[in-house]
Image: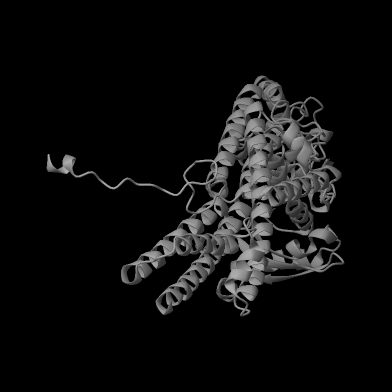
Amino acid sequence: MESTVATAAIAAPGVIHLSVTNLILQADPVVKAVMAMLVFASLWSWGIIFDKIFRLRSLANQAEQFEDRFWSGSSLEELFERVGQRPKDPMSSIFVAAMKEWRRSSSKGGLPPATGTVQVAERMDRVMKISLEREMDHLNRRMIFLASTGSVSPFLGLLGTVWGIMNTFTSIGAAADTSLATVAPGIAEALFATALGLIAAIPAVVFYNKISSDLARYALRLENFAGEFGAILSRQLDTK
Amino acid sequence: MSRDSVTPTPIKPSRSKDGKVERVVTERSFSGGRYTGQGYAFSLLLHGGILALAWIGVPFFHREIPPTPPLIVDLVPIEDITSAAPPPTPEPTPEPTPVVPEPPKPAPAADTPPPDTMPPPPPPDPPKPEPAKVVPPKPKPPPPKPVPPKTKQDDIASLQKLLKDMQKNAPKPPQQTADNKAPPTNNIAPTLSDRASMTELDAIRRHIEGCWRIDPGKEGNENLSAEVKVFINPDGSARAEIVDMTRYFVDSAFRTFANSARNAVLACGNIPISPEHYNELKEIIMNFSPQGRIN
């Protein structure tokens, strides 16, 4: 008839604080290196993201202003004088390139009447195309880093996690102890690498898509402008 | 040959003032520095902010784990109820690890006691009146087993004591090895919870068993067993329902037996039911079997 009362307190999980700083500081060197790379990738890609976003916004504003002036009805020569030799934005730089070519052709004087006009118009189209491509090439710089961050950093994080879990298993083997207290910190710290990888990758992918579609739209806008300007110039040549 | 004789018109690209070939499209100096610098500054700020938050501690990283209330378990030694083998360690401190050597024990123990329990009752009754009066030396045979005024329960208890002693001597070696192994593994939880869950129910069973009056020797009883659904009220009283009502009406032996079981439940008060487990235990199906045991 003896009955015993046992107080079975569920073993309180020790004093392991899984704070972010602890997770980083306790990690294995390889995992630390992976984490450092991921943090750097995140830093860099966010730098690119901010850079591109600010730039695209200001480019859109500048294009707006330039188009306003261009279509305002004032003479193109006047606009050319105003924009000057150092165009500030891609659209005005396309305009300047075409105007320069126009001036160069017309300053040579006697354009052969029939064949000449076609050739001048063609040449100006080509010049505008070159200018546009150069501008777009410049704008597209470093976008590739965003793309590769988005695709590679999850793998990098996974590498850190796999490495960390391997270490955890080794330590389980060494301690011959499978209690949660032995296993949990190692796994938490390993998984933190994957978390970092995803944290770096997700914004990179999202903003890569956003920025590249914005860039494509801007390129289309430039192309349209170049096309319209070319049409205006060739009509001018015909009427001459 | 003729190609050589024709002198091609020399290409004379227009030259700028310094004599170099003039670019058709003037190179533009891209002044991207402003936004690039700004972008990286913002990026640094963002990461610094996140790191600072992590350092200070974002609220959700420190979600408090609600303290689990200590689970108070009434560890009823199993042998009291089922008359199965006692756990190898009779010490009051519940050792979780001995479970390992336990399994082999119950089998032989469970087999041996029933035959033993049946014989003892008869001997005490006839000899008691005679040896006490007539011959003093005669009591000698009884002493090894029980002391004269014994009920059935005492017999069982003493037998169990014997069994305990036997097992205390026998299984020590394996037990110690188990104890040596125990400290490194912290996995107490499974074995402890196994015990806890069965013992509360066992306490109730034992309590009802105490109220049960049954004649185990009645003819036909050995094949009977009655399932009774027990509804326990919060105050410890209970009501009972016999599950197999068809047999109840058909089989008179079963009816007697089942009635005794039901009466046991009805007669019992103060059933030890803990309020926190009330909902799990308020409806139990108990299997009353002969030999005065409830499963």
Q: Is residue B29 left or right of residue B40?
A: left
Colouring of the image: one colour
Foreground pick, B167 / A93: A93
Is the residue B34 above or below the residue B208 in the image?
A: above
Is the residue A106 above or below the residue A182 in the image?
A: below
Total of numbered circles in the picture? 0
| Residue B117 appears anywhere in the view | no
Q: x, y (%) of residue B260? A: 71, 65
Q: Residue furthest left?
A: B1
Is the residue B204 above or below the residue B144 in the image?
A: below
Q: In this view, does B83 lie to the left or right of B4?
A: right
Foreground pick, A135 / B190: A135
Q: In this view, does A9 lie to the left or right of B109?
A: right
Quarter placement of the N terminus of chain B: top left
Q: x, y (%) of residue B37? A: 72, 46
Q: Quadrant of residue A124?
A: bottom left
Q: x, y (%) of residue B282? A: 76, 65
| Residue A149 appears anywhere in the view | yes
Q: Which residue is drawn at 72% across and 41% down?
A: B192
Quarter placement of the C terminus of chain B: bottom right
Foreground pick, A188 / B161: A188
Q: In which quarter of the image is residue B3?
A: top left
Q: Which residue lies furthest to the front in this view?
A: A110
Q: Residue at x 53, y 56 (%)?
A: A136
Is the residue B79 above or below the residue A77 in the image?
A: above
Q: x, y (%) of residue A177? A: 66, 28
Q: Which residue is drawn at 72% across and 32% down?
A: B186
